[in-house]
Amino acid sequence: MVSEYVFTETIGLIAAFCTTFAFIPQVVQLYKTRVTTGISLGMYFIFTTGVFMWLIYGIILSSPSLIIANSLTFIFALSVLVMKWMWK
């Protein structure tokens, strides 16, 4: 029988995969076109800060799903933020 922890982390990892990799099309589109007019600098700044805080929270809890998801999401969100700043 699968432990409750393994089941919970599996659900977390599946959710993490979906929400994290949803950023890839946005990052690729911005990189290809260099058009960032539809991206809100303020929203991405707040979002990226929030993701970083979730990463810290995951580290404190030693939760692999939170750590993996938020590490990757932080990288993707930060890359969007940097592209927005560079290609205003």
Image (cartoon, rainbow, N blue to C red):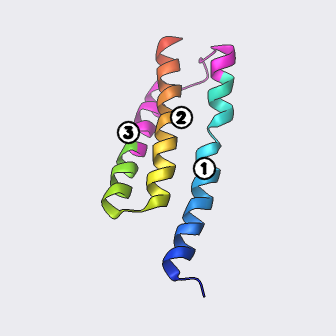
Q: On the rendered structure, is 8 left or right of 57?
A: right
- Quarter occupied by the N terminus: bottom right
Q: Give the range drawn in magenta.
A: 30-51
Residue that mark 1 sits on: 19
Residue that mark 3 sits on: 49
Q: Residue 31: within the magenta?
A: yes
Q: Earlier in the sequence, mark 3 or mark 2?
A: 3
- Between marks 3 and 2, how big is the CA–CA gap? 12 Å
Q: Which of marks 1 and 2 is nearer the N terminus?
A: 1
As rendered, which of 46 and 58 lies closer to the eye? 58
Q: Which of marks 1 and 3 is nearer the N terminus?
A: 1
Within 10 Å of the Cα at label 2, are there few (<14), some (14-19), or many (20+) other Cα atoms? Answer: many
Residue 30 visible from this viewpoint: yes
Within 10 Å of the Cα at label 1, are there few (<14), some (14-19), or many (20+) other Cα atoms? Answer: few
Q: Residue at x 65, y 31 (%)?
A: 26
- Between marks 1 and 2, how big is the CA–CA gap? 11 Å
Q: Which residue is drawn at 49% across and 12% down?
A: 86
Q: Residue 21: within the magenta?
A: no
Please name the amino acid that badge 3 sits on. Thr
Residue that mark 2 sits on: 76
- Measuring from the top left, give residue 43's x and y in whole percent: 47, 33
Q: Is the C-beta separation of discs 1 and 2 under 8 Å?
A: no
Q: Which residue is drawn at 62% across and 28% down?
A: 27
